C-alpha cells in the first residue's frame, strides 16, 4: 500500500476540512509526527504514519477509523481488529506464551502463541506473518482459520478493557523460538488435550480470550490437531 492510499484509508471518518492539504503532504512522501495529529476515537485529528495504530471497526467489522495502539486500551476501549494464532511444532504440540510483566493487561498470564493488531489495509494473515517473527523470532507456515468470526470483550483486574474482533488461526513453526522480552517472559509446549483440560478446569490460568477460544474449538481430531472451522488461509 502506498503512503497516499494509507492516508486516504485513515481519513475515512473525517470531514472534508483540511483533507486536501493532508493528502498533498502524503503524496509528497512527507511523514508527519504524532504532534501533527493522530486519529482519535472521534476522528478529530489525522495521522499518516500507520506503523503503530489499530483499526477501529463497527459491529459489522467495517473500518470506521484508527487510533494509536499505545493509548487505545482504556476502561472504554473501542472495538478494533486483532488476531490470535496457535502455533504447533513437528510433534503437534501447541506453543503457549506467558505475557511479560510489563504488559498493561493480563501481565504474567499464560495465553496462546501470539496475538496482535491489524494495521490499516492489512489482513489478519499478513499481520500474523509480521508479528510472529517480531515477537517469537520464527516464521509461520500453513496458516488456516479456526474461528474466523471470534469476538470478545474482557475486563482486566485494573479495569482496562479488551474489545476485539479477533479471528483465530493455527499454523506451524520450525526452528528455535527466541522471544521479545518486552512481550513474552516464558514459553512452554503442551498438547491440545492438556490445553483443553486447563481451559475447562482452571480457565483463570489463561487469558480470557485464550480460554474462550479453546472452549469454542473443543477436542482435537484425527492427528491430534484441533479441527478447522474455515478453509486454507496461507499456502505456506
Image (cartoon, grey):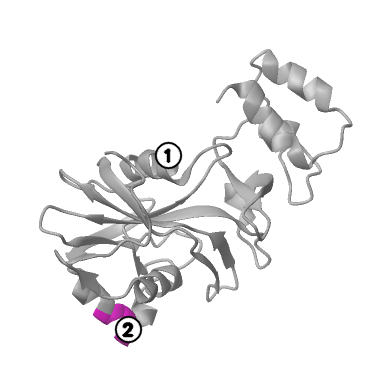
- Which residue is found at the position 36% from the left and 45% from the top? 233
Identity of the residue furthest to the right in this view: 17
Identity of the residue furthest to the bottom in this view: 201
Q: Earlier in the sequence, mark 1 or mark 2?
A: 1
Query: Around disc 2, counting alpha carbons within 10 Å, would you say few (fewer than 14), some (14 to 19), or many (20 or more)?
Result: some
Is residue 48 visible from the viewing direction of this image?
no
Picture quadrant where residue 93 is located: bottom left
Residue underneath mark 1: 126
Residue 141: give its label.
none
220 sits to left or right of 99: left
From the viewer's side, name the closer residue of 133 and 37. Answer: 133
- Which residue is found at the position 35% from the left and 65% from the top? 111
Query: Around disc 1, counting alpha carbons within 10 Å, would you say few (fewer than 14), some (14 to 19), or many (20 or more)?
Result: few
How far across and down, in percent of the image, does residue 208 sit?
44, 73
Q: Secondary structure at mark 1?
A: helix
Picture quadrant where residue 137 is located: top left
189 sits to left or right of 154: left
Q: Is residue 197 above or below residue 106?
A: below
How far across and down, in percent of the image, does residue 210 sit?
39, 69
Tell me if residue 201 is in the magenta stretch: yes
Location of the N terminus by quadrant is top right
Q: Main secondary structure of the magenta part?
A: helix
57 sits to left or right of 195: right
Q: CA distance from mark 1 to mark 2?
A: 31 Å
Residue underneath mark 2: 200
How far across and down, in percent of the image, does residue 91 sit?
10, 58
Q: Secondary structure at mark 2?
A: helix
Give, as a single range, the part of the protein colored magenta: 197-202
Amino acid at each position: 500500500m502506498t503512503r497516499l492510499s494509507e492516508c486516504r484509508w485513515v481519513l475515512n471518518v473525517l470531514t472534508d476540512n483540511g483533507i486536501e492539504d493532508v493528502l498533498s503532504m502524503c503524496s509528497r512522501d512527507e511523514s508527519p509526527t504524532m504532534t501533527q495529529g493522530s486519529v482519535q476515537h472521534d476522528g478529530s485529528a489525522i495521522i499518516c504514519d500507520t506503523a503503530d495504530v489499530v483499526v477501529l471497526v463497527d459491529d459489522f467489522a467495517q473500518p470506521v477509523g484508527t487510533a494509536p495502539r499505545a493509548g487505545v486500551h482504556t476502561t472504554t476501549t473501542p472495538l478494533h481488529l486483532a488476531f490470535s494464532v496457535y502455533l504447533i511444532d513437528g510433534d503437534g504440540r501447541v506453543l503457549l506464551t506467558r505475557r511479560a510483566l510489563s504488559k498493561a493487561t493480563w501481565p504474567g498470564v499464560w495465553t496462546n502463541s501470539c496475538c496482535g493488531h491489524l494495521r490499516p489495509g492489512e489482513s489478519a494473515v499478513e499481520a500474523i506473518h509480521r508479528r510472529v517473527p517480531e515477537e517469537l523470532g520464527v516464521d509461520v507456515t500453513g496458516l488456516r482459520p479456526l474461528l474466523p468470526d471470534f469476538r470478545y470483550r474482557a475486563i482486566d483486574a485494573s479495569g482496562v478493557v479488551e474489545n476485539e474482533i479477533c479471528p483465530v488461526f493455527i499454523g506451524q513453526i520450525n526452528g528455535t523460538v527466541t522471544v521479545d522480552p518486552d512481550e513474552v517472559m516464558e514459553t512452554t509446549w503442551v498438547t491440545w488435550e492438556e490445553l483443553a483440560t486447563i481451559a475447562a478446569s482452571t480457565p483463570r490460568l489463561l487469558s480470557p480470550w485464550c480460554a474462550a477460544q479453546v472452549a469454542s474449538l473443543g477436542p482435537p481430531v484425527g492427528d491430534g490437531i484441533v479441527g478447522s472451522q474455515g478453509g486454507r488461509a496461507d499456502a505456506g
